[in-house]
Amino acid sequence: MHDIAHTKYRAIIVAFIVLFVAILILAVWPDVRRTESETEKENATILAKVMYQCRDGKSVYAVYVEGAVRLELSDLRARTLPQTVAGSGARYATLNGDFVFWNKGDTSFIQENNILTFTDCIRI
C-alpha cells in the first residue's frame, strides 16, 4: 500500500514539473500567432517619426512606414493602421473604418466610431 501511495505521489510531482516546464516554454516562446503582414510592417522601412500635441493635453506618436502608420496614443493605446484612399492628405484606418487617423502637412486628428477623439493635433 505504501508503494502505491508513493508511486501516485511521484506521478503527481512529475506531472506538475512537466506542466510548469510547458508553461515556462509558452511564456518565453515568441508569439507564433503573428501574421506575415504584421512582421513585414514591423520590419518595414521607417519613413518618419512624428510627435503630435493635441487638444486637451493629448498626444499622438506616429511612426510612418511604407503603406501604414504605427500610433502610440497618450491614453496608452497603440494601433497599426494601413493607409487607405484619401481625397486630401493621408488617411489610415481599420478595415471597418471605426478607427481613422488623418494627417495633412503638420496636422492630424483621430476619429473613433465617427467621433473626433484626438483633435487639433500639431506636429512638435
Image (cartoon, rainbow, N blue to C red):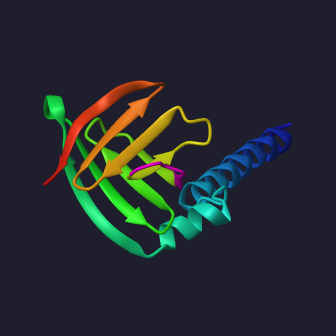
Residue farthest to the bottom, as pictured: 45
> Would you say 110 lies left or right of 10 here?
left
The picture quadrant where one finds residue 74 is: top left
As for residue 87 lying within the magenta part, the answer is yes
Does the image show residue 115?
yes
The mark tally for this picture is 0
> Would you say 15 lies left or right of 120 here?
right
The picture quadrant where one finds residue 31 is: bottom right
Q: Residue at x 48, y 25 (%)?
A: 113
The picture quadrant where one finds residue 53 is: top left
Q: Position of residue 41 (x, y in %)?
A: 53, 65
Q: Position of residue 108 (x, y in %)?
A: 29, 45
Span of residues in magenta: 83-88
- Relative to the observer, which residue lies in front, 62 or 72? 62
Question: For the N terminus, which image quadrant?
Answer: top right
As for residue 84 lying within the magenta part, the answer is yes
| Majority secondary structure in the magenta region | loop
In the depicted structure, whether residue 72 falls above or below residue 75: below
Q: Residue at x 18, y 47 (%)?
A: 122
In the depicted structure, whether residue 105 falls above or below residue 3: below
Q: Residue at x 62, y 56 (%)?
A: 26
Does the image show residue 30?
no
Q: Position of residue 114 (x, y in %)?
A: 45, 25
Question: For the C terminus, which image quadrant?
Answer: bottom left
Q: Position of residue 29 (x, y in %)?
A: 59, 63
- Relative to the observer, which residue lies in front, 113 or 104? 104
